[in-house]
Image: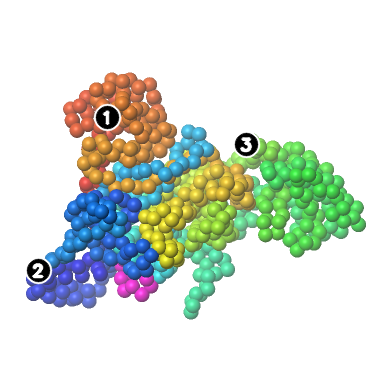
Amino acid sequence: MSRLSDLLRTARQLNPQLGADLELEIAALTKRRSFGLVFERHQPEAVELPGRPVRRGDKVRALPPHASAERADQRLWRVVKIAPSAIGAVADLEELDQDDPETNTRSIDDLVVVAEFKDTIYPGLVETGRVQRGGDKPFHTVINAENFHALELLTYTHRHAVDVVYIDPPYNTGARDWKYNNNYVEADDDYRHSKWLAFVERRLKITRELLNPDDSVLIVTIDEKELHRLGLLLEQLFPDAVQQMITIVINPLGQARRQELARVEEHAFLLLFGNAKPSGVADDLLTTEDAARTASGVRWERLLRGGTNARRIDRPNLFYPIYINPENHRIEAVGNPIASDAQRNSVPERLGLVTVWPVNTNGAEGRWRVSAEAFRAMIGRGYAKVGTYDGKNDRYSILYLGRAQIQRVENHELRVAGRDSNGTVIVEENVTRAASVVPKTVWNRPSHRAGEYGSGILRKLIPGRNFPFPKSLYAVEDILRPFVKDKPNAVVLDFFAGSGTTAHAAVRLNRQDGGRRQCISVTNNEVSADDQAGLRKSGLRPADPEWEALGICDYITKPRITSAITGKTPQGDSIKGDYKFTDEFPMSDGFEENAVFFTLTYEAPLSVQHNRAFARIAPMLWMRAGSEGRMISDLDERGWDVAETYGVLANLDHAEAFLSRLSQVTSVRLAFIVTDDDSAFQMVCRDLPEVVVPVRLYESYLQNFEINTGRTL
């Protein structure tokens, strides 16, 4: 039911004639031609909060009994009183939004708290894990939360501080992939499109508060189902932005559709704010790939000869074994050519090594491009390496720098920046033209195939766990690169994080240029529709540990990001396979990055004001200070602490010691002062170092959320 219908019903109840007159006028208005995007802004959304303790005054829904297949009661109740009983705590309930409300009494174990989006929330965070391999680098953060509320939280920690927002919202195809007010939106829902627009609009309004107005980018991917409506919505919400759309081929084989052409593409809207513009990169993403790679960038040739004159009998002296250490992907030795009539299985294997022969995928014996002697010399100079492992055909590729590339090194067009752990040269472009290409608006690259480089990579990272339609890792990497290439400290936000591809792309970009970018990923812990049915049959329901363990955040996002950084699967095995394209290296190497995982909590304002919720507010202070270094989570008996980038003072009697420590830590940027006394706050501020910005707690926190940012519903 739309918001307008709700208001009309209320008007009819209060004054039947007034309701009838309003209905006639509205009917006349809807017959007129409207320009631009017109849709019904539905009643504010509500989200269930499984696991959140039930408090007096809360809005709640009654859960169905365990092992029940019946639909949950969708009515909202207010908790009037909580009292002990023989069966545990019970709540007296009163039905909401009714002229003659019912009353009820239920065990609090059978209630779930509900937050409506028109309500003011006071968020906090609880850490649920972390992975640290990046030294003093900032942390990537993953927040398990309803994304509307997480966006509100970020208005306190990152207002106007985000450089890139990349989101992949539900495509509204009619599949059971998203909910409105706790109900799946089906294909036959008459309000499907307006519900989707209202759903997206609310989140985009808050997004504007997070983007840096002077230089930032909003990227929204979509398919054709909501393409045009989304374009109009973005124009209306962000009239001052420069807007473009790109088309990305994600499935060259095409997805068959009944009575339609096979779909091969999806789309992405780019909105550029302030002075934002794309930086030059090495590939325009449309030009024939070989031509683009030859014109700029470093090309490693395959040692296996292809095309004509490529058989063993054509050049017998170029048929010899190469021995690889599968643990570190190092070429350990190069054998000698064998006689033209000798069988390759007559050559003994070497202990602990894999023998690689020039054999084609069809099993035919081929030949290498260079002699064994010349190839040994290339290895010595660092001009040869092991390429990717082809699991389907159980074979390694061998790569080397050809004469043209070596000539570019000698002409200083290519620069040897160093050597990797195997002694292979790390070669970089040394001319500006290597990064002078602006991507085009149609992209066609094999690396953007969603099946191979989305689902395929996810299967390697978290074997046995399925997620529908993950993005190609390299497609997300390519769409971020032009907008963060010149921002090594960029903050990237994805509040439809799904499997965590955006964070994964950010850590790859950091590895390529030594950046310290950080990604904030937000996803809920919704269990898939198919899994829900099976769990309910097993007698489970939301908030049960077995149920929550299969939620998207805990089952997919967190383990995917952890595995990417550590190089190990959730089972502790080294990840098989290699990364490809911009830089090739074993996935088991992982990344030198840090990540921390949080769950959003809902705090009581009085607890915050009286400093009783500091442990849950503490992560927000740390995030506001840059998400790096030590987190101040406990002020102990001193009542103050100073970390690398911020300090917190709760006991003003110890202000002198606090200020003394602040002056010694030159990297501190923020000082949080806990006081309700304005004169005391000003006194501390006067003695702060000039570079330190004071923030008053908990006034700044409470005011931030009481403003109801983004709640024009």
Colour scheme employed for the rendering of this structure: rainbow
Residue found farthest to the bottom: 259
Magenta segment includes 194:
yes
* Label placed on residue 368: none
Cα separation between marks 3 and 1? 49 Å
Magenta segment includes 663:
no
Mark 2 is on which residue type? Leu
Residue to which mark 2 is pinned: 14
Q: Of callouts 1 and 2, which one flags the residue occurring earlier in the amino acid sequence?
A: 2
Give the class, few, some or many, for how many residues have Cα within 10 Å of label 1's Cα (few <14, many ≥20).
some
Mark 1 is on which residue type? Ala
In the displayed structure, does residue 282 sit left or right of residue 368? left
Q: Which residue is drawn at 75% across and 54% down?
A: 304
Of marks 3 and 2, the one in the foreground = 2
- The percent coordinates of residue 189 (x first, y second) are 33, 73
Q: Tell me, yes or no, if residue 115 can be seen here.
A: no
Q: Residue at x 30, y 55 (%)?
A: 109
Q: Of callouts 3 and 1, which one flags the residue occurring earlier in the amino acid sequence?
A: 3
Residue found farthest to the front: 86
In the displayed structure, does residue 185 sit left or right of residue 433? left
Residue to which mark 1 is pinned: 650
The correct choice, above or below, for 600 with respect to 181 in the image is above
Q: Tell me, yes or no, if residue 131 can be seen here.
A: yes
Discs 3, 2 touching: Cβ within 8 Å: no
* Label placed on residue 417: 3
Magenta stretch, residue numbers: 184-195
Q: Quadrant of the C terminus?
A: bottom left
The correct choice, above or below, for 306 with respect to 176 in the image is above
